[in-house]
Image: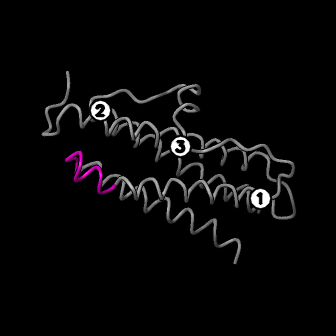
């Protein structure tokens, strides 16, 4: 049964489609952050191992909330690696070195890509698709990513 929440079905579909891409981005970023946690090397290993753990735990919560938002809109969330790789705007990276600054630089760029994408959709959700709830939801997620990006960026000061 489709939700009857004051948003046209075609708008619910459009919003869910955009959120599917966001979920794929979140999943890829989560996986890359897990990789950094597992494989970071160097004199700052312990500190960065814990730092990346905190970041991937936050991303796990974000992924779950995005998938649940998609379901609230009456659509199914993508849930396979194939789907995520087809929907993501991010790229996988293979590393020659597993140094913390290399991981941090890459993860920061991905957070910033997600922030820009969210920022571009905040007004679109509210105005074009008449979905203030998703607009508000994305604003909150964007702020979480801004905080995570700040924490990553601070390593370069």
Which residue is farthest top?
1
User: Where is the C terminus found, in terms of image quarters?
Assistant: bottom right
- Mark before the other along the chain sequence, 2 or 3: 2
Tell me the mark number nearer the camera, choosing from 2 and 1.
Answer: 2
Spatial CA distance of label 1 from label 3 is: 20 Å
Q: Which mark is residue 102?
A: 1
Q: Residue at x 39, y 40 (%)?
A: 18
Q: Residue at x 22, y 47 (%)?
A: 131
Instruction: Determine if the magenta segment contains residue 8.
Output: no
Q: Position of residue 93 (x, y in %)?
A: 73, 44
Q: Position of residue 5 (x, y in %)?
A: 15, 37
The reply, left or right, for residue 27 in relation to residue 153 is: left
Question: How many neighbours does mark 1 have within 10 angstroms: few (below 14), some (14-19), or many (20 or more)?
Answer: some
Which residue is farthest bottom?
157
- Mark before the other along the chain sequence, 2 or 1: 2
Q: Which residue is mark 2?
A: 13
Disc 3 element: helix
> Magenta region's main secondary structure?
helix
Tell me the mark number nearer the camera, choosing from 2 and 3.
Answer: 2
Q: Which residue is mark 3?
A: 25
The reply, left or right, for residue 40 in relation to residue 133 is: right
Q: Residue at x 55, y 40 (%)?
A: 27
């Amino acid at each position: 049964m489709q939700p009857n929440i004051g948003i046209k079905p075609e708008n619910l579909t459009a919003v869910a489609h955009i959120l599917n891409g966001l979920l794929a981005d979140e999943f890829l970023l989560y996986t890359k952050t897990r990789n950094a946690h597992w494989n970071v090397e160097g004199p700052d290993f312990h500190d960065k191992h814990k730092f990346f753990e905190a970041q991937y735990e936050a991303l796990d919560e974000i992924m779950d909330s995005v998938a649940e938002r998609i379901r609230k809109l009456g659509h199914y969330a993508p849930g396979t690696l194939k789907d995520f790789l087809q929907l993501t705007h991010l790229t996988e990276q293979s590393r020659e070195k597993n140094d913390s600054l290399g991981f941090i630089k890459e993860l920061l760029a991905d957070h910033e890509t997600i922030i820009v994408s969210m920022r571009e959709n905040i007004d679109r959700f509210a105005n074009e698709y008449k979905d203030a709830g998703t607009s508000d939801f994305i604003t909150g997620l964007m702020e979480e990513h801004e905080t995570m990006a700040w924490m990553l960026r601070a390593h370069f000061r």
